[in-house]
Amino acid sequence: MSELYSVLVESAAGGEVVLRITTVHPDAGPPPDTASFTVAVLLDLWSLLDRGFGALVDGCSLDRAEAQRLAQDPAWASRCRHLRELSFGRQVVCTAEEHAALEAAMLAGEPMLFRGEPVGGLLGYANQAYVFIPGDPMVFATAVAPLVAAHGVDQREFDEAYEDWPDDPEQRPRARVRLKVHDAGWLGFVRPGWRWDSAAR
């Protein structure tokens, strides 16, 4: 997956997170001015920690076990996992027979449905079959809306770079994004100074 944005946490306190988001792919365009996009990039951070990939977060000194412990804190783990599945999608175990039937449908050019839900892909490893159920942007945005108290984008810089992409990373377009949530507790995994890449849209 090609990364589109680099995300830096400038501050995180009292239910408000301030991010500096830099566009790193010339075709990405400016970061969307929506709360759902901002929550999606924060969920990318949570997912990295949940999988023990703290090493992919600049400024994060947590080892694999520490990163996973932070992500799996009961104060936010359930909500973040649910929102991540709505945004990105989820992997679901299926039987070999179900997998074979879906594969036949795909080869025949027929719609692939798994227990009534559209299938985005078929997976299999370690003698276990899976289906990938893609996320739904509209459902995700609807779930995010009641969580957000305020959201805004300002301090846009180097927007002219979208017309003439620079070689110098310091001249790439960036903007400050503020997100304030009603329940400060569920963003407790976010730390000032951390930076990671995101393919959120």
Image (cartoon, rainbow, N blue to C red):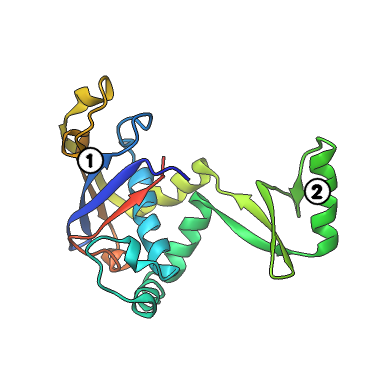
Residue 81, position in %: x, y? Answer: 48, 64
What is the number of the mark on residue 103?
2
In the picture shown, does residue 58 fall above or below 19?
below
Q: Residue at x 82, y 40 (%)?
A: 107
In the picture shown, does residue 196 fall above or below 34?
below
What is the number of the mark on residue 41?
none
Three-letter residue code for mark 2 = Glu
Residue corresponding to mark 1: 152
In the depicted view, which residue is nearer to us: 4 or 147?
A: 4
In the picture shown, does residue 47 fall above or below 117?
below
Three-letter residue code for mark 1 = Gly
In the picture shown, does residue 51 fall above or below 181?
below
Residue 62, position in %: x, y? Answer: 29, 74
Residue 152, position in %: x, y? Answer: 22, 40
Residue 101, position in %: x, y? Answer: 85, 52
Q: Residue at x 34, y 39 (%)?
A: 34
